[in-house]
């Protein structure tokens, strides 16, 4: 009788030699400099931070509030974690990012264990963790307060429990699957249930194994799922007033489908090349009517099938529904697992495909190096920077209103590249060394060393990307404006945003106060801003004009290109990144500008 090798593998028994390199990379990239800078960005990043700050200060842990307005449409788990961090270590940038940094660590540990059970080798597990640690998408969204990182963790946990249950259906794995789905719901809504359950159903369909659901203690999973969700739903229902409001979902422009698929590759470049190579090892018979998979004899094919369905279902689901560039993040662990499987096999038995990939990386990398060096050399000098903040590159950009996450990138110009000279040169050097050494050592048959140079290349690239985001932060964050006027803003003064709340959501967080909004706009504060007990946070033009001519000091955040019509004298208190702060009174000496 064949031995079930999967059940005999303890992923932590052989993990000792991998612990310190992986932990060191996590500390370097996720738990050091990246916790401190850049400042929190406008948009969902600042919205979540402000909601958590208000939750921590008011003690209302049931319904998140944003600018004093209930936000029942906001999924609470990320807000809870951030508020707990604020309570523990104080309100700051690093405290806001700390929960997601530990979530990233949990994901890396989980993917290590998952890969070891999928592919029965610690080498594949090591590569899977390395790939995710150096993934552009994971690195970026482990530092932004978006729910995508949490959703990725819970989907991975749910599928890990499912995979273990295929060998031994146990009550704990069923309960853990239900808990992961419940936490996914608390993190991102219904998609937190649809993704893992949909992948499981597809896998059981192609493996002709629907009977597994009946053997997998479904009552335990459903019971714990309800046990986690029902108390929160009940408390929310009791805390919210009995008024019929429909949660408003603001219109977000979808990126073109090809652009969405392009960013799937960007998030895990260059590792996706190895994942594509792994697809050649998936048997076509799995997708025929007569396909039958034995849990023991067809272990490798089952593992590959799960990864392919995981990535494919996630990408397809978002391709034909609401999508943003970062929605594909839950597919990255599956792509990392596919790439890790191929890399571990190629290390033992080097293949011609590895050399081909090495040449592709080399040619593409050298071309990128040439472009980066050209931009770094030909760009004019960067604007001077004050000692306390980044240089203001706003005047060098073609600023527009954007609804896409990466929309501000198209505002960049050749003139602005001087501010990014250091990140450009670091990236060029890292790519040149990485792709060259990778090709040389692949040709010599030293595969592990070749892969290590790719890892090193990605580490330096992520550091350079972080430096670039920090330089670009004045354009996408109101933190500089908030810190500039904070010494001037008194208790009785009024701060007004000329735009939607998300346009300047970092402003109230850093000022630690409620703001007013000029003219009601459909944004994250709808629909509860219409409730009878909602604070009066909206002003129209006439109300602002009346305040402007009164003795009350008023600060107005506004895009520099579209200031509101104001009666009387206006004073520019601060200006940065194409936005400025206007006031009806001059500085009293406290502001930095």
Image (cartoon, helix red, strand yellow):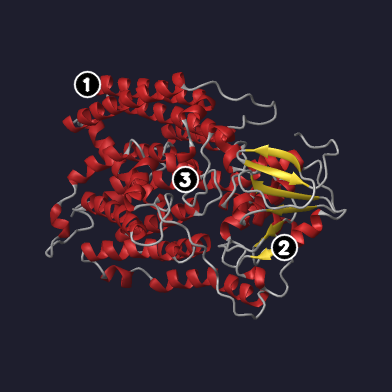
- Taking depth in this image into account, of 306 and 236 the one nearest to the observer is 236
Q: Residue at x 77, y 52 (%)?
A: 567
Reading the image, the residue beneath label 1 is 443
Reading the image, the residue beneath label 3 is 407
Q: Residues within 10 Å of mark 2 (few under 14, many from 20)?
A: some
Choose the circle earlier in sequence order: 1 or 2: 1
Q: Quadrant of the N terminus?
A: bottom left
Q: Which mark is residue 385?
A: none
> How far is disc 3 from disc 1 in space, using C-alphas?
40 Å
- Taking depth in this image into account, of 113 and 575 the one nearest to the observer is 575
Q: Residues within 10 Å of mark 3 (few under 14, many from 20)?
A: few
> How far is disc 2 from disc 3 in space, using C-alphas?
29 Å
Reading the image, the residue beneath label 2 is 537
Does residue 512 appear left or right of residue 71 in this picture?
right
Task: Provide the secondary structure element on which disc 2 rests.
Answer: loop
| Residue 204 position in % (x across, y down) | 26, 64
2 and 3 marks in contact (CB < 8 Å): no
């Amino acid at each position: 009788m064949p031995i079930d090798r999967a059940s005999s593998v303890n992923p932590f028994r052989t993990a000792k030699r991998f612990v310190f390199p992986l932990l060191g990379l996590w500390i370097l990239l996720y738990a050091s400099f990246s916790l401190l800078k850049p400042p929190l960005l406008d948009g969902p990043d600042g919205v979540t931070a402000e909601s958590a700050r208000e939750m921590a200060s008011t003690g209302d842990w049931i319904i998140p509030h944003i600018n004093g307005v209930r936000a029942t449409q906001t999924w609470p788990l990320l807000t809870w974690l951030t508020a707990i961090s604020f309570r523990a270590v104080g309100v700051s940038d690093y405290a806001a990012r700390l929960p997601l940094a530990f979530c990233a660590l949990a994901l890396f540990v989980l993917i290590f264990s998952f890969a070891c059970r999928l592919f029965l080798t610690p080498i594949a597990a090591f590569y899977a963790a390395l790939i995710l640690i150096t993934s552009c998408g994971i690195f970026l969204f482990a530092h932004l307060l978006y729910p995508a990182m949490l959703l990725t963790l819970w989907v991975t946990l749910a599928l890990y429990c499912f995979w273990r249950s295929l060998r031994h259906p146990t009550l704990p794995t069923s309960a853990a699957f239900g808990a992961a789905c419940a936490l996914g719901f608390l993190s991102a809504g219904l998609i937190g249930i649809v993704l893992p359950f949909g992948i499981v159903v597809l896998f059981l369909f192609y493996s002709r194994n629907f009977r597994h659901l009946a053997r997998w203690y479904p009552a335990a999973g459903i019971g714990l799922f309800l046990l986690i969700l029902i108390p929160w739903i009940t408390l929310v229902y009791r805390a919210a007033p009995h008024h019929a409001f429909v949660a408003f979902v603001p219109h977000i422009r979808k990126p073109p489908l090809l652009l969405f698929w392009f960013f799937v590759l960007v998030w895990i470049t260059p590792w996706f090349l190895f994942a594509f190579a792994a697809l050649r090892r998936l048997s076509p018979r799995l997708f025929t009517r007569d396909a039958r998979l034995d849990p023991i004899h067809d272990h490798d094919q089952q593992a590959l099938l799960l990864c392919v369905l995981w990535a494919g279902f996630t990408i397809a689901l978002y391709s034909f529904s609401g999508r943003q560039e970062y929605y594909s993040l839950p597919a990255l662990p599956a792509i990392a697992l596919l790439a890790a499987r191929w890399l571990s096999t190629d290390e033992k038995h080097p293949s011609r495909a590895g050399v081909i990939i090495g040449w592709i990386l080399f040619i593409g990398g050298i071309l990128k190096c040439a472009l980066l060096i050209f931009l770094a050399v030909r760009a004019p000098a960067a604007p001077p920077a004050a000692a306390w903040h980044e240089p203001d590159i706003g005047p060098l950009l073609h600023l527009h209103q954007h609804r896409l996450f990466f929309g501000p990138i198209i505002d960049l110009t050749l003139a602005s590249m001087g501010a990014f000279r250091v990140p450009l040169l670091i990236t060029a050097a890292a790519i040149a060394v990485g792709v060259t050494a990778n090709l040389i050592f692949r040709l010599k048959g030293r595969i592990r060393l070749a892969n290590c140079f790719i890892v090193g290349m990605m580490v330096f690239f992520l550091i350079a990307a972080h430096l670039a985001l920090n330089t670009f932060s004045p354009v996408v964050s109101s933190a500089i404006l908030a810190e500039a006027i904070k010494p001037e803003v008194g208790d009785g003064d009024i701060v007004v945003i000329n735009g939607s709340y998300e346009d300047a959501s970092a402003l109230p967080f850093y000022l630690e106060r409620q703001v007013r909004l000029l003219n009601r706009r459909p944004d994250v504060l709808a629909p509860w801003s219409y409730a009878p007990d909602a604070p009066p946070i909206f002003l129209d033009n006439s109300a602002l004009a009346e305040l402007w001519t009164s003795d009350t000091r008023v600060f107005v955040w506004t895009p520099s290109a579209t200031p509101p019509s104001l009666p009387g004298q206006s004073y520019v208190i601060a200006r940065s990144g194409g936005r400025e702060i206007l006031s009806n009174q001059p500085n009293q000496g406290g502001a930095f500008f």
